[in-house]
Amino acid sequence: MQKKAVALMLIITALFLQGVLAGDTVNFGSELKIIEIDIVPSPSSWTTTGETGSSTSTAANYFTLYNNGNGACIVKIAVNNSANWIYTDWTTYSSSENLNYFTANFTLDGITWTNIATKDANGNPQTILIDNLPAGGNVTFGIKIWVPKLLSTIQDQQFEIYLKAEAIL
Amino acid sequence: MKEKIVALAICLAIAGVAIPAYASETATITVTVTPTGTLSISVTPTTYDFGNLAYGSEANTGTTGYFTVSNDGTLACKVQIYASNTANWTLGSSPGYNIFVVNATTSTWASAITLTTTAQDFITSLNPGSSQTFDIGLKMPTSGDTTAQQSIIVTLQAVAI
């Protein structure tokens, strides 16, 4: 009985502080930000041919990323290794001739190409594609792959470009 | 304790403290790349003179790798090998009248392969920038109808892997 009384007092106090007794609106719910991103073309795949030591790329606006959620988000991007190719950063790629080492870039404007890193140890992408994509907004981007300078196999390679959107706090 | 937590939660909710529930979502793009590159091998030296050999005798370039094949391209390859007939002799699997045999090895003669006039695998994998030494052996015909000098052409070819 005593506990119920304490709880009731707390509620009344809270209501008072909120001015409910004066007729203000109360938000009884929590704020749920839904993040939904979609990529066009869909399914999102790109097949290309590339010569050793050279790059192959999509058009700068080949992909369109839509934020179909109800909140702004930051979108990060990552690339993984393929069956035979190993990711390396641009500095290493450009300065050495390591067997099976490739790298990848993205562009938003078709002019500046930014290196895409792999996921970190926790499985999260490290490279920011766009730091603020508003709800209902979209952004176009392109992908470039630098084929290894030296290859141990001529087999087709398949890997994923991974995008992760997170709500902006 | 449980009642306190419940009361606190109620108070927070009533006080309008929105508890944000943030979400995240992922998407993937599948990229498939068909690589192309350069297949290129070279052999040094390109000749070997067995000198004068009697019918029925054997000779080879040694066991230390007289020849070296190098991958000068950008693609790994396997190396195939084959040999030619000569002007007067025919390549075979065992010596005979005007029939000679050519072997090749990258290690010991016990593991040598017998060459034919069609390509067969010799080195299973040679990465770009890598090289492999090898030797050639010759088994003269048991007998023949000429003493003229004979030239054998041994060809190596790179095949992408």
Image (cartoon, rainbow, N blue to C red):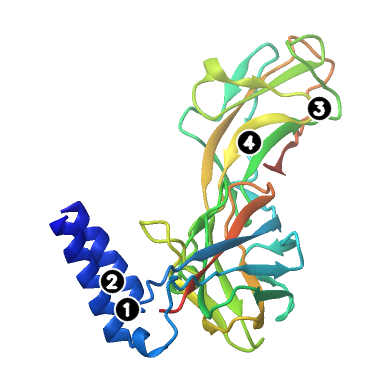
Tell me residue A112's x, y (percent): 58, 87
Structural crowding at the residue carrying mark 3, measured as other residues with C-alpha within 10 Å and reported as few (<14), some (14–19) or many (≥20):
some
Relative to A117, is A45 on the left or the right? right
Identify the residue under disc 3: B117
Q: Nearer the viewer, mark 2 or mark 4?
A: 2
Task: Look at 40% across and 79% down and name the residue there.
Answer: A169
Q: Nearer the viewer, mark 3 or mark 2?
A: 2
* Among the two numbered marks 1 and 3 on one chain, the one whose residue lies closer to the N terminus: 1
* Among the two numbered marks 3 and 4 on one chain, the one whose residue lies closer to the N terminus: 4
* Chain at tag 2: B
Q: CA distance from mark 1 to mark 4?
A: 99 Å
Identify the residue under disc 4: B49
The amino acid type, in three-letter code, at marker 2 is Cys
Q: CA distance from mark 2 to mark 4?
A: 99 Å
Q: Do the residues bearing badges 2 and 1 touch, measured as CB atoms within 8 Å?
A: yes
Identify the residue under disc 2: B11
Residue toward you, A21 or A109: A21
Is residue A152 visible to us here?
Answer: yes
Q: Which mark is residue B15?
A: 1
* Among the two numbered marks 3 and 2 on one chain, the one whose residue lies closer to the N terminus: 2
Relative to A5, is B9 on the left or the right? right
Task: Look at 35% across and 85% down and name the residue there.
Answer: A21
Q: Secondary structure at mark 2?
A: helix
Q: Which mark is residue A163?
A: none
The amino acid type, in three-letter code, at marker 3 is Thr
